[in-house]
Amino acid sequence: MSVLAAVSASALAQVQPFENGFFHARNVGTTRWITMRDNYSSGLNTRTTTYDVSALCTFRSYSNIVSDPGSVVYVAKYGQGYNLYAQGTDVFSFTNGFVVYLANAAVENAYILYSRYSGVEAHLNDASSFREEGAVSTIYNANYPQNEFWYIDPVSQEDEQYFGVTPTVQIGSDYYQTLYTWFGYTFYSEGMSAWYVKRVTDDGYAIIAPVEGTQVHGATPVIIRCSGADASANRLTPIYDTEAGPADNQLHGVYFCHDQGRLGLQIEGPHRVVTTFDPATMRLLGKTADGQLAFVNGTEWAKNSYDREKDTTYYLVPANTCYLSVSEDTPAELPVLTEQEYIDLAVTSVKADAAVDTKGVFTLSGQQLNATGQTDGLPAGIYVVNGRKQVVR
């Protein structure tokens, strides 16, 4: 059925009830929350007057979107309507100039979301089903009129509308997760911190540094040290932010991992937006065989995607996470250390290797440069000189 059968253009009175800010959207009829799972659209089908919004889907359980940045939408006024920002794109550029308009729905505090093209309106609907995951479209179903009505609620750290990090790596009583969000943020929950990888050493360590200041800038891939095992203990306050993160950050971020449909079948075509995990040249946050936090090439830390038709398993970088790009001769496990921890480890290693005699100049990886202890002519850097670390400028 054409979207024109939903509501005529003359019946809709545009409203603009929201100031710029971060929001979640939940369907009135299905009670499912909306999120963005890829960044592709084929646009408007003028024959059917429908629009390709397959990049969007919905989930009934809030736990399925609580840690998904694709569900956190920045709503910004644009003329009489709004432009919506999420996961590295926005509606205006995503649709080649469409603006989202709101109209009051026949349910209190709910709205109709629609766009208009050459007099044709496309209304956002959630498909009617009892499944956990729903399919979003612009096809109106007269049997379920409330499926085109949406509640739009501000993201709030103080109630059920919060956004929080769900960690995937536990080291003792500590919890970690890499995170890549299009928006910036501060930590609402106490005890959280953000780190990035500043370099990978020749002897196989990932050296991390804290993100300076109280804010993590948007589109900055980081490691999050969490306060607890549950997202409710790791709440973030989203901030609209376009500043750049640390220039020496070696982490790469992935927004999407859309590989399978609602029935578990492999997606074909441009809506399949994935980053394939290559164990030879990529490392994901995990832990070493002896339980240290590390970037590793183990596929258990990737997303396992099985194609039933081809009887093939794919390993993908999970959505909204980060990875290290490395050369093929890089060790399989790169333990995570701060610069100071790496220096202390090197000093200990040099002393152990030298046993009784620690005289001479050594690199931090333990290579002896001379036995005299002289640093004249050495490139600037940190060395171990006669058993003590020393900065050469």
Image (tube, rainbow, N blue to C red):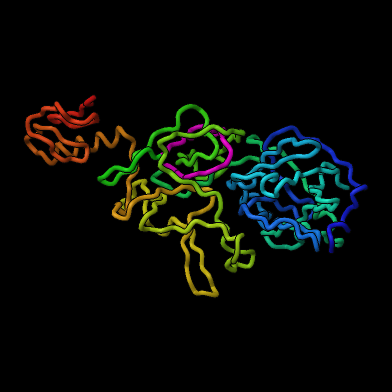
Q: Is residue 265 placed above or below 284 in the rendered structure?
A: below
Q: Is residue 270 placed above or below 180 in the rendered structure?
A: below
Residue at point 84%, 43% (across, down): 103
Q: Is residue 340 placed above or below 152 in the rendered structure?
A: above
Question: Residue 15's quadrant in the figure?
Answer: top right
Instruction: Give x and y (percent) for residue 225.
Output: 45, 39
Residue at point 46%, 61% (across, down): 315
Q: Nearer the viewer, residue 189 or 351?
A: 351
Name the side, left or right, on which 156 lies relative to 169.
right
Residue at point 24%, 24% (across, down): 393
Q: Identify the magenta region.
A: 174-196
How many marks on residues?
Answer: 0
Instruction: Give x and y (percent) for residue 163.
Output: 61, 41
The N terminus, quarter of image: bottom right
Q: Nearer the viewer, residue 354 or 41?
A: 41
Name the side, left or right, on which 34 lies relative to 273.
right
Magenta region includes residue 185: yes
Name the side, left or right, on which 310 lies relative to 82.
left
Q: Is residue 59 visible?
A: no
Instruction: Give x and y (percent) for residue 151.
Output: 77, 45
Residue at point 43%, 44% (across, down): 251
Magenta region includes residue 275: no
Instruction: Give x and y (percent) for residue 129.
Output: 74, 63
